[in-house]
Image (spheres, grey):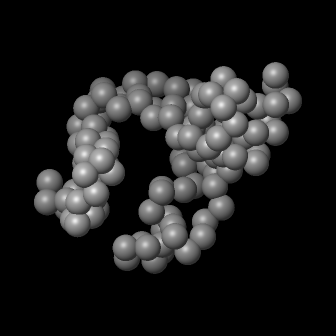
Amino acid sequence: FATEIKRCGESLQRHNCRAVCHKYGNKDCCRFLFPHEIVDTSYFDPSTNAVVLMCCDGTINYFNPYILVFCRHNHDIKCILSGKGAKAAMFYISDYITKMDVKTYEMLSLL
C-alpha cells in the first residue's frame, strides 16, 4: 500500500507551475499557493481558527491516501472550519454551480 501511495502521489499530486498558475495578475507567485509551507506536525491555530496540516513536501497537494490509491485521481484535502477559508470555499462552490459571470477572485476582493 505504501508503494502505491508514493507512486500515485508522485504522478497525481505533485504540482508543477504552468502558465495557468499565473492567470489573473499572479505574475510573481502561483495562484494555487505553491509551494506550500513545510510544517513538521499538524496543529490547530486558534488565532485563525484553522487546522494547519503537516507538509513534508511543498509541491505535493494535501491528500488522503485511501482516496488517492483507490480512486487514482488528484485531489486537495483542506480543513475549512470558518473565516476566510470557509468564505472562499462558499464562493468557489457557488461560482462553480451557477457559472456566474463574476469570477471568484473578483467576488473575494469585495469581502
Image location of residue 17, percent across then percent down: 61, 66
In the figure, is residue 90 to the left or right of 71?
left
User: What is the total number of numbered labels drawn onto the structure image?
Assistant: 0
Q: Quadrant of residue 49?
A: top left
Q: Which residue is rendered at x = 25% and y = 52% of the image?
A: 98
Which quadrant of the rendered structure holds the C terminus?
Answer: bottom left
Q: Quadrant of residue 16?
A: bottom right
- Please identify the residue farthest to the front as the structure is shown: 98
Above/below status of 27 relative to 79: below
Image location of residue 44, percent across then percent down: 40, 24
Q: Is residue 106 visible?
A: no
In the figure, is residue 92 to the left or right of 4?
left
Above/below status of 36 relative to 99: above
Above/below status of 65 relative to 24: above
Image location of residue 63, percent across then percent down: 59, 34
Is 52 in front, or is 1?
Answer: 1
Is 84 in front, or is 38?
Answer: 84
Q: Which residue is rendered at x = 56% and y = 40% of the image?
A: 75
Image location of residue 46, percent across then percent down: 30, 26
Q: Which residue is rendered at x = 25% and y = 46% of the image?
A: 94
Q: Is residue 93 visible?
A: yes
Is 39 in front, or is 2?
Answer: 2
Is 46 in front, or is 104?
Answer: 104
Q: Quadrant of residue 4?
A: top right
- Please identify the residue farthest to the right as the structure is shown: 3
